Image (tube, rainbow, N blue to C red):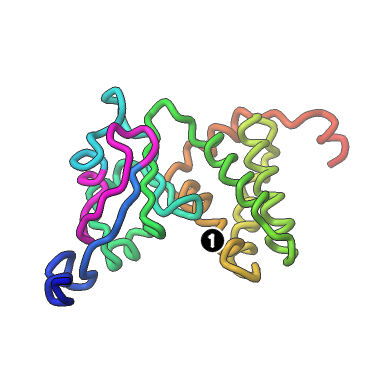
Amino acid sequence: MNGSDWFKSFGTPSSAGTKVFSLSGDIVNRGIVEAPLGVTLRELIYDFGGGVKGGKHIGFIQTGGSAGTVLTDKFLDIPLDFASMKTNNVSIGSGVILVASEDVPLLPFLAEVAHFFWHESCGKCTPCREGTLQVKTIMDSLVNRTADPASLQRLGRLLNTLNDTSFCGLGQAAPLAFESALRNFPEVFDQALAESHVPETCQEET
């Protein structure tokens, strides 16, 4: 109604206009907000969203939906414009901002994401059909503390293969949550691996 110049008065020079964000998870005010591009996660979560429920600390944030990046609170002040997001390896995708409090364990959450992609794979191409299954299996083993010592190396290879060789966007996008979590929360994966005990039957088969 007000024209393109009015719309471009919002946002940043490289990312003009506004975007609709969906605030969900352990946040006081869940819902939809339209904000200028360049808004920060801190502004979205605390100014629009009212902060984390119960005054708790942020455990992790996922931006962009299931095929989005998993971030620490160190990313709270990064502007959500296209240039900054690319520089900082942040995906905004559909605009979903999922906030998890410090009480939410990361690995079971990621295991659910892995189950989602495995379930949603159409099965047409081998990398996605088999790759999502293997990612799900590895994530389950990390949660259950039955992962073998080579699990993380195998997970990294699987994620690269999914991204490079899947036919469609589902398989190509599936690795993003896990790649970002490995990058931003390495200690969580290392602890799970350190606490894992491979069942004797698996050791015999290996």
The answer, for residue 91, to whether it is visible in the render is no
User: Residue at the location (24% across, 46% down)?
Assistant: 44
Whole-percent x, y for residue 170 in the image: 58, 61
Is 44 situated left or right of 93 in this image? left
Q: Which residues are magenta?
A: 24-44
Residue of label 1 = 173
Mark 1: which amino acid? Ala
Front residue of this view, candidates 114 and 1: 1
Secondary structure at numbered mark 1? helix
Is 15 situated left or right of 107 in this image? left
Whole-percent x, y for residue 131 in the image: 69, 56
User: Residue at the location (45% across, 42% down)?
Assistant: 185
In terms of image quadrants, where is residue 83? bottom left
Is 115 situated left or right of 64 in this image? right
Whole-percent x, y for residue 144 in the image: 65, 29
In the image, residue 39 lies in the stretch drawn in magenta:
yes
Asked if 189 appears above or below 196 in the picture, the reply is below
Q: Quadrant of the C terminus?
A: top right
Asked if 189 appears above or below 154 in the picture, the reply is above
Residue at the outermost top position: 54
User: Callout 1 environment at 10 Å: few (<14), some (14 to 19), or many (20+)?
Assistant: some
Front residue of this view, candidates 11 and 158: 11
User: Residue at the location (37% across, 39% down)?
Assistant: 99
Q: Quadrant of the N terminus?
A: bottom left
User: Residue at the location (37% across, 40% down)?
Assistant: 24
In the image, residue 179 lies in the stretch drawn in magenta:
no
In terms of image quadrants, where is residue 202? top right
